[in-house]
Amino acid sequence: MHNTWYPLRFKPILKEKLWGGHQLRDLLHKTSKAAPYGESWEISDLPDDQSIVSNGVHIGKTLGELNNAFAKAVLGQKVAAHYGTKFPLLIKFIDAADDLSVQLHPNDAIAEKEHDSFGKTEMWYIVHAEPSAQIIVGFNKAMTAERFEKTITENTLTQDLQYIPVKAGDAFFIDAGLIHAIGKGVVLAEIQQTSDITYRVYDYERKQQDGTYRDLHIDQAKVAIDYSEDTSYILDYNREAVGAQPLKHSRYFKTDIVHLATAFYTVSRTDSFTIIIALNGTLTLIASGVPETLAKGETILIPAACEEVTITGSGSKFLEVYL
């Protein structure tokens, strides 16, 4: 029998997309259906997309219900003091069978003013990539508001974008305002602020099933875009190292990558929740003597009030996310 607090599993929320494929089924085993799913929302506290607990005594409860009733226990006192009862992160897997739109997201100030929402800063970890897969991050030359306006008017934006070949294990930090796109043939884990606001600036002139084009948000993008030439979005780390090492520590989230050899790993954080995202192999999490198995592509939330959790799984890798 579980104690009151234990590692929480949630039912994935699957989203069909124009650009979606079948890797969420075939690679990550999220579903048996053949629909073109593009996203699996692993942990979400958005009002219309509430994650539902699928294990233990809290089964059937939404993440929002747990936060409203037990914010300090779930989030941790430090996090609850800042975010109240709102869970600050949204965790996804994305399968891009086709190119995603070229887009960007607003920062906190713009999102709060225009949408009464958090902004959207995110990071990506590439789980799988086809040999020719690439992403778009930023511009390949100095960009100004005037030049951006010209590329939109003349439909030449794609010539000024920075294309980056990717492979499994690559990681990127996509700050609010940074123009970007996920290319076809990429499966990735996404860690982001709890927000679903996207300003789409280019969509390859493709039509939806009903024959219409998806909306573009050029005017909003002009206000929110970041023209700086900062290249710190590429996250370097030692891929052969054993143990934990930071991928990205930002004001919105901290993400470490952990490579287990023959040892075990302990999570005993009390001032923040911890999210574990399994990248390969099989993990076993033990809390209060109760084991919970986590396979590749599965995600689990360890509440701040949870007792010490031990993680084993020789040769396995996982992402550890916290605040």
Image: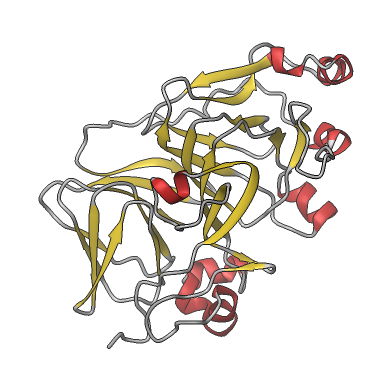
Residue at x 44%, y 51% (from the top left corner)? 25
> Who is closer to the viewer here, 117 or 109?
117
Q: Residue at x 53, y 80 (%)?
A: 66
Image-based side of 94 in relation to 85, left or right: left
Q: Nearer the viewer, residue 194 or 293?
A: 293
Along the line of sight, which residue is nearer the eye, 167 or 84?
167
The vertical placement of 275 against 309, above or below, is above
**265 with respect to 76 (left or right):** left
Using residue 107 as the reference point, say whether residue 81 is left or right of it. left
| Residue 24, x across and y down, in percent | 46, 49
Q: What is the basis of the colouring in this image?
A: secondary structure
Percent position (x, y) of residue 138?
64, 24
Where does the image place residue 139, in percent across and percent down from the top left? 66, 18
Among the 4 quarters of the image, the one containing residue 223: top right
In the rendered view, tell whether residue 51 sits above or below residue 151. Answer: below
Q: Which residue is rendered at x = 69% and y = 33% of the image?
A: 101
Residue 63 % position (x, y): 54, 74
Left or right of residue 5: residue 214 = right
Number of marks: 0
Q: Give the residue displayed 71% in from the left and 34% down from the top.
A: 103
Q: Quadrant of the N terminus?
A: bottom left
Q: Quadrant of residue 269?
A: bottom left
Residue 17 in the image: above or below residue 132: below
